[in-house]
Amino acid sequence: MNRYADADVAVVGLGAIGSMAAWRLALRGHTVHGYERFGIGHDRGAYSGQTRRFSVQSQREPRLTPLALRALDLWRELERDTGQRLLHLVGGLILGPGDTPALTAARASARAAGLDHETLDAAELARRYPQHLVRPGDSAVFDPHAGYLRPEPAVVGAVRRAEELGSTVFDRTRVRSLEPDADGVVVRTEHGARRYAHVVVAPGARVRDVHPAARATVLPRRLVQGWYLPEDVRHYLPGTFPVFDRVGDVTAYGFPTVDGATVKIGIYTAGHPVVHDTDHVPLTVGRGLLDHFHATVSGYFPGLHPDPVATTVGVEGYTTDGQPLLGPAPGTRRILLACGFSGAGFKFAPAIGDVLADLVGDGGTARDVGFLAPDRALAAWPPEALTPA
């Protein structure tokens, strides 16, 4: 036992990032305590919903591609450690108007990293993938290294592996405050307090309830995903229907069927609703949003019944520049922030966990993540976004 009273590291939040951080820290021999406000593998976070997209191409930031490549190896390592298949590389499409910045960036990212990829014009896209509406001027990038992850088994498996390596997990335990001092950090919960050398803060969109540095910069938003019935499910099987991101005038993402009956589609809206009270997230999907889903699926996915047969509600954290916070919190190197990943962080999660283990053990990392530093010049959200109407 070290000179700290309880353990080397506390990990606050055991979802996408926290579960992987606990696993990677425990693997390096750290004593770890993990705190989870809800249950392990719960349905209230950004990662829930049966599938999350994996891709090594980047639509915005090419410096993220090396993290995705590292994550690819670590996902396979976690599969070996847990005996579960988590990553399915079925290929992926990014499609939309050919001059859309996200599509241009994906092509540039693939070329810069020397990744296998294929550019499809409108005619070839329509021929191969009639499940999508294809218009003149549309194009796509096909990524053979893309696919989908199974998030709930991944989170549960990583936490269990951390426990096998000696970690202690406190689930259904809410962290009320973090109190750093010269010797460590006191983590105060509803059940008492413990002291640690370092604390990793990774509670997703709920980070604003835990650390003041995130209150103005990480905005919780409510996202709804839907599952749709295909007219012929054979056209949506893995290997036939790749995971996809539709970009440009309509933004949506989706996956091949994983249950043999339904297809999951996520549709972006203009300004997902802000969640001001993360204890009481509205779970009802209103008529206006369902009408929007109906119109989008009718227009862009002609082989699907346009009304969802199931929906799920999650909460994601967004920063103003679209990049997460990763690294020491302003004012102390004992608290490490890993939050604000919106819905795009799951594919990187084990690599982010590895970076956090570097920062705890070595005080730094060889990975190029300085551009994600929490103390970077980052605009705050306007007061009207942070305050209930």
Image (cartoon, rainbow, N blue to C red):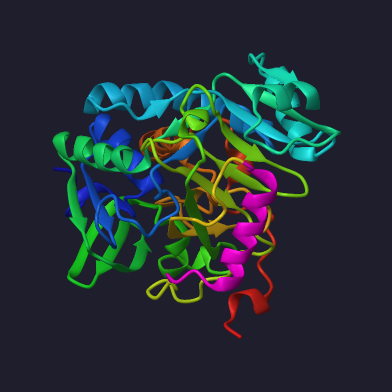
Task: Kindly tell me whether residue 362 is visible in this rendering.
Answer: yes
- Dominant secondary structure of the residues highlighted in magenta in the image: helix
**Residue 101 point in image, percent of width and height:** 79, 39
Q: Is residue 297 above or below residue 363?
A: below
Q: Residue at x 42, y 48 (%)?
A: 47
Where residue 314 sits, quadrant-wise, is bottom left
Q: How many marks?
A: 0
Task: Kindly tell me whether residue 121 is visible in this rendering.
Answer: no
**Residue 270 point in image, percent of width and height:** 69, 62
Q: Which residues are magenta?
A: 283-302
Q: In the picture, which quadrant includes the C terminus?
A: bottom right
Query: Is residue 140 found left or right of 324 in the rendered image?
Result: right
Q: In the picture, which quadrant includes the N terminus?
A: top left
Query: Is residue 377 found left or right of 38 in the rendered image?
Result: right
Q: Residue at x 49, y 48 (%)?
A: 228
**Residue 190 point in image, percent of width and height:** 22, 73
| Residue sitting nearer the eye, 75 or 9 | 75
| Residue sitting nearer the eye, 185 or 92 | 92
Q: Residue at x 68, y 48 (%)?
A: 251
